[in-house]
Image (spheres, rainbow, N blue to C red):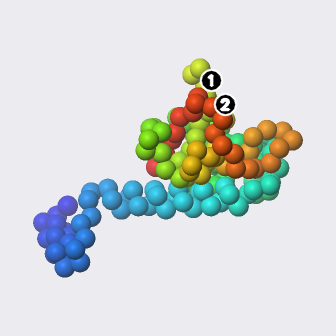
Amino acid sequence: MSRASAVSALTLAAVTGTVLAPGAASEAQAATARSKALSVAAAQKGDPYKYGAAGPHRFDCSGLTLYSYKKAGKTLPRTAQAQYNKTGRVSAAKRAKGDLVFFHSGGSVYHVGVYAGSGKVWHSPKAGSVVKLEKIWTKSVRYGRVR
């Protein structure tokens, strides 16, 4: 940050009473993307599962998360494992609505959904089912944050 920028930021903080920490704007943008992705996933309620589908009216699990985040202006890879590899780890204590929930067995991720809060996830579970909100049914989950 240049001296002039720093002075301007300090002046703004003094006048408005707000302080912007480094990275605060990017975290606010990430929170907005999480919120938008969550809304998009919820709007797909009832859409049927179809293996390999990424919307707009049929989804598999990673297709739903890919579609939701694409509508929120973020790019994700296609598969649940690749999405896990691309996101930043978040502890269960620090998870937020809109984070991704990765279901795993051993070292492999086999399912993904969008965290809805209160221990629930929006997901497209399996053939013969639809996009729905469900309680997270296992402790074998990890959380990822899209950057």
Question: Which residue, given by chain and number where applicable, does mark 2 sit on?
Answer: 110
Which percent across, then down, holds residue 49? 81, 45
Determine crowd level at label 2: few under 14, some 14-19, many 20+ residues with C-alpha closer than 10 A. Answer: some
Residue 128: image quadrant is top right
Instruction: Find the residue positioned furthest to the top.
Output: 106
- The tag on residue 37 is none
- Secondary structure under tag 1 reads strand
Residue type highlighted by circle 2: Tyr
In the shown orientation, is residue 131 left or right of residue 111? right
Residue found farthest to the bottom: 15
- The residue under the point 22% across, 74% down is 17
Give the distance between the C-alpha atoms of the residues marked 2 and 1, in whole angstroms. Answer: 7 Å
Please indicate, yes or no, whether residue 63 appears anywhere in the rendered image: no
Q: Residue at x 44, y 38 (%)?
A: 91
* Residue 124 percent location from the top left of the image: 74, 45
Q: Amino acid at mark 1?
A: Ser
> Callout 2: helix, strand or loop?
strand
Toward which corner of the image does residue 141 lie, by quadrant?
top right
Quick one: label 1, few (<14), some, or many (20+) residues within 10 Å? Answer: few
Instruction: Tell me the quarter of the image containing the N terminus.
Output: bottom left
Q: Where is residue 137 drawn, in percent x and y?
A: 66, 35
Are circles 2 and 1 on residues that touch, CB within 8 Å? Answer: yes
* Point 62% across, 23% down: residue: 105
Q: Which of the 4 image quarters holds residue 61?
A: top right
Q: Which residue is mark 1?
A: 105
- The answer to whether residue 120 is seen in the rendering is yes
Q: Is residue 14 above or below residue 133?
A: below
